Image (cartoon, grey):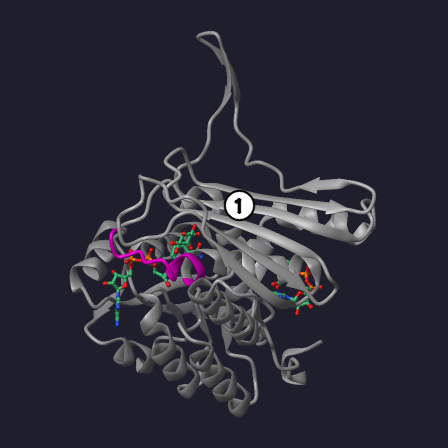
Amino acid sequence: MTLNIGVIGAGAIGRDHIRRCSQVLQGARVVAVNDINRDNATGIVEQLRLDARVYDDGHELIKASDVQAVLVTSWGPSHEEFVLAAVAAGKPVFCEKPLAVTAQGCKNIVEAEAKHGKRLVQVGFMRPYDQGYRALKQVLTSGQIGEPLMLHCAHRNPTVGEAYTTDMAITDTLIHEIDVLRWLLDDDYVSVQVVFPRKSSKALSHLRDPQIVLFETAKGTRIDVEIFVNCQYGYDIQCEVVGETGIAKLPEPSSVQMRSNARLSNEILMDWKERFIDAYDVELQGFINDVQAGQLQGPSAWDGYAAAVTADACVAAQLSGEVVPVSLPPRPSFYGK
Ligand code: NAI
Ligand code: NAD
Ligand code: ISE
């Protein structure tokens, strides 16, 4: 059976997910597209020559009888209403991060899903599907470097646009580390502090960049994450785990090493779309397969909520400069262990 998908939001990642659902993945086709900017929707439908209807309203798309599952790839602030509408319609929904822009918004989704009685929501946290992070997790679980004591991480983008604000370094960028490190360590955060180093002259005047976020986990592991979204030189994700008996590092993406013009060099990627291209394929194929099998297994609405609670504490820590506690209620049994 082919799964009929409707996509809300045909921007950068929406277009990329439409391409992968139509050309790369198995078992799905895009039959409906909506974007608040209609040209974005018609543009991708024409470009890929899709047999898909363009809707003027996301809610109409969700209700359409031929749409069996929904991808929400519109701007973060619009996610909550579309996910709630998909749950109300009883349709599985894959929502790009963040699930909602506030913890309360995520909680509304968690409650609606629990009321429905069955998982319908997957959040687009793709890093747990990345081969590099999976290999790193395997090293940690095997005990080869003992218990993790400290993590040194960096999340660097070459540049960001004018609409990107200081809090988005948390809610839009760090949110990936918030999610994947919790999964990597099988641990939860208990406190966070944010410090601001000297500001880069390459950052726009309204933006504080770079930032350093310092977490403590329930098991006492300390994590520092540098967020630097105007680093100029590339899209660079680093994660080094210092254990009791050794150090394990996230592998670099593979690239040809060059000897040329008296230099030894490796290319550095510039675009997030390329850095996690395989992980996006695996996460969405997983969603399609799980919808067909009738049981979602990927990152859940609870994972989206846990990330949002942590993000709220990080934003409070940005504003106060203080150490801010992170307190997450226990995971409901509905979402497994
Ligand atoms: P974008 O700005 O390129 O695209 C957003 C699109 O949504 C635009 O075409 C806009 O017109 C449309 N839109 C906004 N409000 C809408 C509404 N109410 N109804 C219908 N369409 C609406 O943004 P981008 O980069 O594609 O990001 C979209 C989402 O994907 C964001 O939540 C972002 O955080 C997430 N994202 C996730 C990534 C990942 O690595 N998992 C990478 C990049 C983005
Ligand atoms: P697992 O289910 O054995 O254990 C992972 C632990 O991390 C669980 O406690 C779970 O609740 C938690 N977790 C899962 N996703 C999380 C997230 N996004 N944020 C925070 N915590 C999270 O895990 P696994 O088999 O190592 O799989 C890890 C992820 O990779 C899962 O999301 C899984 O669905 C996905 N996966 C996908 C495929 C595929 O081919 N599609 C294959 C294997 C795993
Ligand atoms: C973007 O939305 C992403 O998700 C990218 O992975 C991240 O690096 C970037 O900072 C975000 O804006």
Per the rendered image, the range of residues in magenta is 162-171
33 vs 302, left or right, is left
- Residue 10, given in percent of the width and then of the height, sits at 28, 60
34 vs 216, left or right, is left
User: Residue at 40% of width from left, 50% of height from top?
Assistant: 23
31 vs 263, left or right, is left
| Number of numbered discs | 1
Q: Label 1 sits on what residue type?
A: Ala
User: Residue at 36% of width from left, 36% of height from top?
Assistant: 232
Asked if residue 178 is among those painted magenta in the image, a careful observer would answer no
38 vs 224, left or right, is left
Nearer to us in this view, 285 or 99: 99
User: Residue at 27% of width from left, 75% of height from top?
Assistant: 58
- Residue 254, given in percent of the width and then of the height, sits at 56, 32
**Residue farthest to the top?**
262
Classed neighbour count for the residue bearing mark 1: other residues with Cα under 10 Å, few (<14), some (14–19), many (≥20): some
Asked if residue 169 is among those painted magenta in the image, a careful observer would answer yes
User: Residue at 59% of width from left, 51% of height from top?
Assistant: 224
Residue on which the image places disc 1: 154
> Taking 200 as reference, is 29 above or below it?
below
Q: Secondary structure at mark 1?
A: strand
